[in-house]
Image (cartoon, coloured by chain):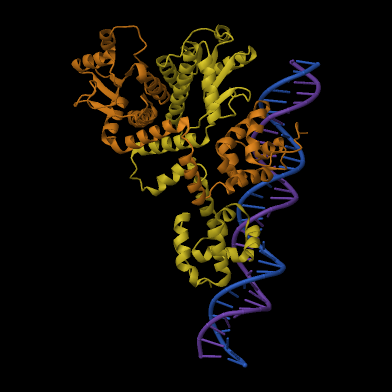
Chain colours: A yellow, B orange, C purple, D blue
Amino acid sequence: MTKVIQVKPPRVFSELKPWLQDHYQDLPKRLQSVAVFAMHNPDVIALNTIASISDQVGVTPSTMVRFAKSIGYQGFSDMQIVFQESMRHVPQPYSERLNSMQRSADREQTVLSHFTQAAAASISRLEQNVDESALLKASKQLAQARMVYIAGQGRAEPVVAYLHYTLVKLGVQSVVLSGMPHSMADKARMLKTDDVLLAISFSPYTANTRELVDICLLNNTKVVALTDSTLSPIARADDFHLEVLEEEVSGFRGLSATMCLALCLAVETGRVRAELDKDVK
Amino acid sequence: MTKVIQVKPPRVFSELKPWLQDHYQDLPKRLQSVAVFAMHNPDVIALNTIASISDQVGVTPSTMVRFAKSIGYQGFSDMQIVFQESMRHVPQPYSERLNSMQRSADREQTVLSHFTQAAAASISRLEQNVDESALLKASKQLAQARMVYIAGQGRAEPVVAYLHYTLVKLGVQSVVLSGMPHSMADKARMLKTDDVLLAISFSPYTANTRELVDICLLNNTKVVALTDSTLSPIARADDFHLEVLEEEVSGFRGLSATMCLALCLAVETGRVRAELDKDVK
DNA sequence: TTATTTATGGAATATTTATTTCAAAAATAA
DNA sequence: TTATTTTTGAAATAAATATTCCATAAATAA
């Protein structure tokens, strides 16, 4: 029979680490090898098959299973889950992070904290992922426009309103297209070659905004797009598009990171515009 | 037979992303779903089984295999390797983290980082300072309303739009007052005793919103206020008001924390409303 | 409309992967 | 030393997972 049967094995990687430190000495030789390898290469444990891992460690698959069981896991696969979960958060805080936070914080979480966590995560990701040069190029494009036409519906509407408000305050001429009762074709006709369309659209992408962008692209009108995915139909490789993805909480996506990016875009546009105006004098 | 057979599928994740951008439009509907999901949740593709993933996407396992093959991979497993490899090196827990810190320290701050930091700080403060019970009381108030009238101008307008959008989606009846061309007194007259005014206002406080709140208070109409200071003229001790203060960057105030609070308020209202509706049955 | 192609889901199948078993090798105790 | 326990590897088995195939549905073209 097996020696030690742990009743409650560590369910998170951060607890597994000290456990191994404590019990390392008592483990048989081969299991010690596995322990050392696992602490040094957690990603391998998370991503490879038992055969591949045991090969790298220099033991047999059975030993891997025994190792897991000696800690108290049901088997190798059960242990592997802990390693996998530990990876999920590290690169980017996706939804799984929220789940684990929920679990760890014993229900005492306030209603608000779910949303602030998601917002903070979204903003952090925005900071890491945004293409700074795309932001600058987009700002330049907007700053050079004779008039900025802003379009967006549904969840994008607040963003439209905010961009419009801020751009106007900064002395950048802009109008909101969404509210007007014209057909998309009519709207597109309003845009002259030295105008720019600023389109905001999130999944599920509304047909109107999409159509508007399509027409503008056909007419060679410049388009700056703000969307939640490069796969969005309004994102085109040859245009200026900015991407921002909001973390969701039980199905709801906020606008915290989006608003942050919008402000940044507007302010930068205002700055470039001010420079241009100065040169003219 | 399958349509496009890619001879050389992207072997690294960073190449796969633009590939999907280019071909997204041409993909069948289900394959598009998979593409969007994969770009939004690369960790899930990397770590889960085909059954679990297809379940999350809402397609069949066959579709996952087809998706991989349409890109040119031998099958799902072949594609999964690319996702897994993209995770492997990303999580360098300590050494890499220090490096990136160092990098950001000596390199000049990006334009965006000023704003993300301000946003993050605002959200963090919101989490710490918000009166949870006030949030719950306000939600209850809104949920019980026959109709929610939302008012706010200027910088508050995006918040109005967002609250309106979200409340409607959640089945809470609401209308936006700001856009209407009536006098404040006329607007106030619209509100019956079982209605609630949801007023959003930030410094400098617009006279209109202030006036509206005053009239409603005189008429004993319930008011829920969202503002940036307890000193705000629309905040009254006997009413339900929520406070959120945005950090400013060279004179500009964002809306990240405000939007977070707005979403929270709306969702909580929707939740309470759903409970009330259930009880009625 | 009808014919033809393309896309999709479900089930059967093949493959991979983990687990168990058992005999033999080490290690330990008497 | 021998007896006993523990550890280990190899092969057999069980479980899971991915892939293929086919009938049908949907979309498109004639």
Q: Residue at the location (59% across, 55% down)?
A: A44
Q: Is residue C23 above or below residue B45?
A: below
Marks counted in the figure total 0
The spot of residue A142 in percent (x, y) is 52, 17
Q: Quadrant of the C terminus of chain B?
A: top left
Q: Residue at the location (55% across, 65% down)?
A: A67
Q: In the figure, is residue C3 to the left or right of B37?
A: right
Q: Is residue A100 above or below residue B125?
A: below
Q: In the figure, is residue C24 to the left or right of B105?
A: right
Q: In the figure, is residue B270 to the left or right of A239?
A: left
Q: Is residue A179 above or below residue B170?
A: above
In the image, B143 versus B165, the foreground residue is B165
The spot of residue A181 in percent (x, y) is 49, 7
Quarter location, residue B135? top left
Q: Residue at the location (41% across, 25% down)?
A: B166
The spot of residue A100 in percent (x, y) is 44, 46
In the image, D29 versus B197, the foreground residue is B197
Is residue B48 visible from the viewing direction of this image? Answer: no
Quarter location, residue A41? bottom right
Q: In the figure, is residue A236 to the left or right of A156?
A: right
Is residue B247 visible from the viewing direction of this image? Answer: yes
Q: Quadrant of the N terminus of chain B?
A: top right
The spot of residue A59 in percent (x, y) is 63, 66
Q: Is residue A159 above or below residue A57?
A: above
